[in-house]
Amino acid sequence: MAVLAIVTGMYPAVFAFVPEARGLFSNKAEALITSSWYVPTFMVHIGFGAIAILAGSTQFFKRLRQRRLQLHRTLGKIYILAVIPSGLTGLIVGFYATGTWYSKAGFICLALGWLITTIIAYSSIKNGNILAHQKWMMRSYAFCFAFVTFRIYLGLGAALGLPFNAYYSYLSFLCWVPNIVFIEWRIQRLRAGLVPIT
């Protein structure tokens, strides 16, 4: 699912070589698309996002943590180093998101949440608090996984024949709020001792 999301998510790169193939950019103002900064900023966002979702997905394999601790740490550092540029550029492009004001608000909150939870997760492990690190990494990756869920919902909307403008703005919250709700439920189960952290 992660690989599929990355393949479909990288399609805007086609715009860099085929200007006519605009895709989602077709809903953007011409002045924004032709500016010197928007498209490169967006490419940085999705490029490092792809790295983050792949590197982050490895952090939840128990066997990898136990047998290849150094690899686990290296992949964790790659994840964090990818989150920072992807999150910061996501914050910038969020202000120019297609749709209503709450479309912009949703993507801005997503970027902020991703950056904040990742920084706390990193600070926790630097302070030796492994339990807090695990929980905040779960939250961080829940935000990161919006990279996947956004494209799933986008595809479902298209498959159902819904008008793009009728559902796109809602995706800015729908792509990450259910992820966070689920992960908080999961963390509560961990705290209750129903599912041990290993």
Image: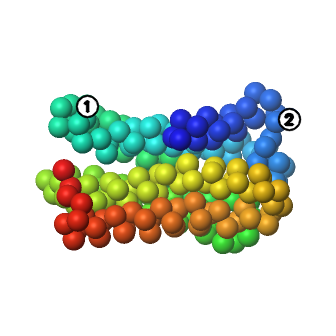
How many C-alpha atoms fall within 10 Å of the one at disc 1: few (<14), some, or many (≥20)?
Answer: some
Q: Closer to the camera, 24 or 67?
A: 67
Quick check: 105 left or right of 191? right
Instruction: Say which residue label 1 marks.
Output: 71
Question: Residue drawn at (24%, 60%), measured in percent from left and top?
Answer: 195
Q: Secondary structure at mark 1?
A: helix
Residue in the foreground of this view, choosing between 99 and 1: 1
In the rendered image, the vertical position of residue 110 relative to residue 40, given as above or below: below
Residue drawn 77% across and 51% down? Answer: 159
Measured Cα–Cα span from mark 1 to mark 2? 42 Å
Query: Looking at the picture, how far across and down is residue 48, in whole percent?
Result: 50, 39
- At 31% across and 45% down in the image, what residue appears? 60
Residue 9 location (% of width, % of height): 63, 41
Q: Which mark is residue 157?
A: none
Residue type pointed to by label 2: Glu
Which one is nearer the viewer's eye here, 75 or 156? 156
**Residue at mark 2:** 20
Q: Earlier in the sequence, mark 1 or mark 2?
A: 2
Amino acid at dot 1: Leu
Q: Are marks 1 and 2 in contact (CB under 8 Å)?
A: no
Q: Percent from the top left, x then y, of residue 186? A: 34, 64
Question: Is residue 81 something one can see in this rendering?
Answer: no
Q: Nearer the viewer, mark 1 or mark 2?
A: 1
Residue 57, position as x, y percentages in the image: 39, 42
Side of 35 relative to 125 (left or right): right
Asked which secondary structure carries label 2, the reply is loop
| Crowding near the residue tagged with mark 2, few <14, some 14–19, many ≥20 C-alpha atoms within 10 Å | few
Q: Residue furthest front?
A: 194
- 30 left or right, relative to 101: right
